[in-house]
Image (cartoon, rainbow, N blue to C red):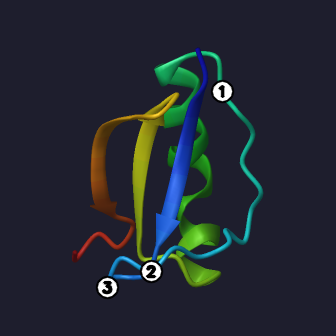
Amino acid sequence: MAWTWRFEKSDGTEVEPAVTPEEFTTQGDAESWIGETWRDLLDGGADQATLFEDDTRIYGPMPLNAEG
């Protein structure tokens, strides 16, 4: 079981993240990582993120901008 993030512009276009994520072994690790890196991701051009467990979307897209 792997937890991964997908990063997108606000229109849903996938973008390469400014900070390269890993595959996480738990949802908590994935959420902690994005909590620590969301500003760098936003500054690097990602507007939103979606969390997946393997191929299943868990939630998202969620805005990386607090105003979103």
Cα distance between the residues tagged 3 and 1: 26 Å
Label 1 SS: loop
Residue plotted at (51% across, 64% down): 7
Disc 1 residue type (three-letter) = Phe
Label 3 SS: loop
Residue 19 in picture, x, y percent from top left: 74, 62
The local crowd at label 1, few if under 14, some if 14 to 19, many if 20 or more residues have their Cα within 10 Å, is some
Residue under circle 2? 13
In front of the other: 39 or 23: 23
- Badge nearest the viewer, 3 or 1: 3
Residue plotted at (57% across, 84% down): 45
Mark nearer the N terminus (1 vs 2):
2
Cα distance between the residues tagged 3 and 2: 6 Å
Residue under circle 1? 24
The quadrant of the picture occupied by the C terminus is bottom left
Q: Are marks 3 and 2 in contact (CB under 8 Å)?
A: yes
Residue plotted at (72% across, 48% down): 21
Residue 1 in picture, x, y percent from top left: 58, 14
Residue 59 in picture, x, y percent from top left: 27, 41
* Label annotation for residue 7: none
Mark nearer the N terminus (3 vs 1):
3
Residue under circle 3? 11
Residue plotted at (59% across, 76% down): 15
In front of the other: 43 or 24: 24
Q: Image check: 38 left or right of 59?
A: right
Q: Residue 23 lies in what quarter of the image?
A: top right
Against 13, is 17 above or below?
A: above
Cα distance between the residues tagged 1 and 2: 23 Å
- Badge nearest the viewer, 1 or 2: 2
